[in-house]
Image (spheres, grey):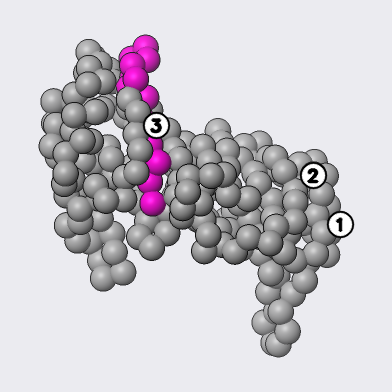
Amino acid sequence: MHRIRFEKTGRAVWMSHLDLMRLMQRAFRRAGVVLHHSQGFTPHAYVSMLLPLSVGMESVCELMEYELDGELALNAVLPEGVRVLEVYESTRKARELRRLRALLTLEYDGAVPEPAAITTLLERPELVVEKRTKRGMAETDIRPMLHAYHVEAAPGALLLTCEVSAQEPSLNPMLLAAAIERYLPEAKPDFVRCRRLEMLDEQGEVFR
């Protein structure tokens, strides 16, 4: 199985998962790369994203699997904001991808809260927020899915770097902002940006 590591930034963050899948398949065709397709009346290309990215989130570590060859020449046919960073072969199973490192930029129009206030909140033994599940929205304790975090101040913002569960169960890093709003409303940010930084295995090592 071949894998591509790519980034999705800038205006491309507003592209949906399905639009991104169509974009990548068109890029393969324009680059002259023939993908392996399934058989039957409605054949489809063997292309899949390991962890679909939510609309509005940036990433510099997206992983896509495909069958047959592809090279970095794909960049010549990709739009602004989507760029292939690496093409390689991998024998690791997707189920080994267990954690995600992300950066939340908490932006404030006024005074920026002290980083210690957010750190103290994240140290709580329980953080219950409304989370989407297979059965709909439900009150869920996300604290067991938060494995590491660090908060530091920046001009007009707080930078929250976190390591969260990626699969079974998964935690959208944006829910940490929801926890701040619920438990520490005086530190609620006026705007939140999220960027995926790296995909990791159970031991916290880089997954490729």
Residue 164 lies left or right of residue 16; in this view the side is: left
Please tell me whether residue 180 belongs to the stretch shown in magenta.
Answer: no
Q: Nearer the viewer, residue 166 or 109?
A: 166
Front position among marks 2 and 3: 3
Q: Nearer the viewer, residue 194 or 150?
A: 150
Q: Amino acid at mark 3?
A: Thr
Q: Residue at x 34, y 43 (%)?
A: 147
Front position among marks 3 and 1: 3
Residue 125 picture location, percent across and down = 16, 44
Tell me the residue that label 3 is attached to. Answer: 161
Specify the quadrant of the image occupied by residue 167: bottom left
Residue 111, compared with residue 104, is above or below; it is above
Front position among marks 2 and 1: 2
Residue 105 lies left or right of residue 127; in this view the side is: right
Label 3: how many Cα within 10 Å (few below 14, some 14–19, many 20+): many
Label number found at residue 4: none
Tell me the residue that label 2 is attached to. Answer: 72
- Outermost residue on the right side: it is 32
Residue 173 picture location, percent across and down = 36, 43
Residue 53 shows in the view: no
Residue 76 picture location, percent across and down = 80, 41
The kind of secondary structure element at disc 3 is strand
Q: What stretch of residues is rendered in magenta?
A: 152-165
Circles 2 and 1: CB distance less than 8 Å? no
Spatial separation of the CA atoms under disc 3 and disc 1: 39 Å
Spatial separation of the CA atoms under disc 2 and disc 1: 12 Å
Q: Residue at x 52, y 64 (%)?
A: 95
Circles 2 and 3: CB distance less than 8 Å? no
The kind of secondary structure element at disc 1 is loop
Tell me the residue that label 1 is attached to. Answer: 32
Does label 3 or label 1 sit earlier along the sequence?
1
